[in-house]
Image (cartoon, rainbow, N blue to C red):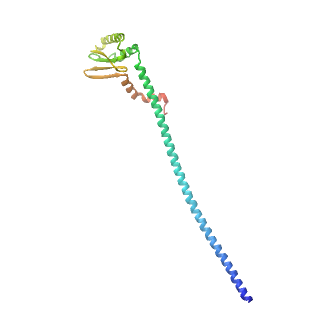
Amino acid sequence: MGSLESLTHKIIEDAKLQAEDIIKQALDKISVELEDEAGKNNIYCEKIKQEAERKAEEIYRRVIAEKEMEIRDKNLFVKQKQLDNVFHEALRRLKDLSLEEYIKYLRHTLSGKDLKGYEIFLPEKYNTEENDKAIKELFNKISESSGVLSDIQYRPIGGGFILMKNGVVENYTFETWIDIIRQDAEGEVLEILYGKGK
């Protein structure tokens, strides 16, 4: 019985050692597989993180670009509004010229121009007996060197004057001149108001 017991005991001990070895091999294999899977997961997570960072950077740049454009548009709007105010104020002042200033303007603008046969249309606001007398005196003086106007009339224009001869109209109203000057001088006015490169 002793040898059977001893044999059984040896078989059990060998089985235990084999079981422990199988378990150890299985654990080693699982450990290697887990490490490999963890490495793959880390690589995958790193790719996801990099992709998220790239997308976040794109979104950030897009938001910054949109905000910069929004700020630029607001600045342009403010500058345009200020420019409108400058030209509006210039037009208002021109329309409010006193008779004396208006006569100086006419003398300066019409001196040297051949006025023979022209009709001239002036703003209604100067159509008073006293003003009309002063304006006619001016045209009498001018006519000595520039020719005689065929007619002087008053019309509802804001300022300046209109000349007409043979159906051809020459528009010297202040609104027209301000528009022309604005087109030519808008860049210069912006530079004066806001400085270069602003």
| Image position of 167 (left or right of 185) | left
Image x and y of residue 135, in percent: 34, 12
Image x and y of residue 71, in percent: 50, 37
**Residue depicted at 31% across the width and 22% down the height:** 170
Using the rendered view, name the quadrant where residue 147 is placed: top left
| Image position of 67 (left or right of 149) | right
The residue sitting at the right extreme is 2
| Image position of 164 (left or right of 189) | left
**Residue depicted at 60% across the width and 66% down the height:** 34
- Residue nearer the viewer, 148 or 155: 155
| Image position of 55 (left or right of 160) | right
Residue 22 vs 8, above or below: the answer is: above
**Residue depicted at 43% across the width and 30% down the height:** 187
- Residue nearer the viewer, 42 or 157: 157
The residue sitting at the left extreme is 166
**Residue depicted at 67% across the width and 80% down the height:** 15
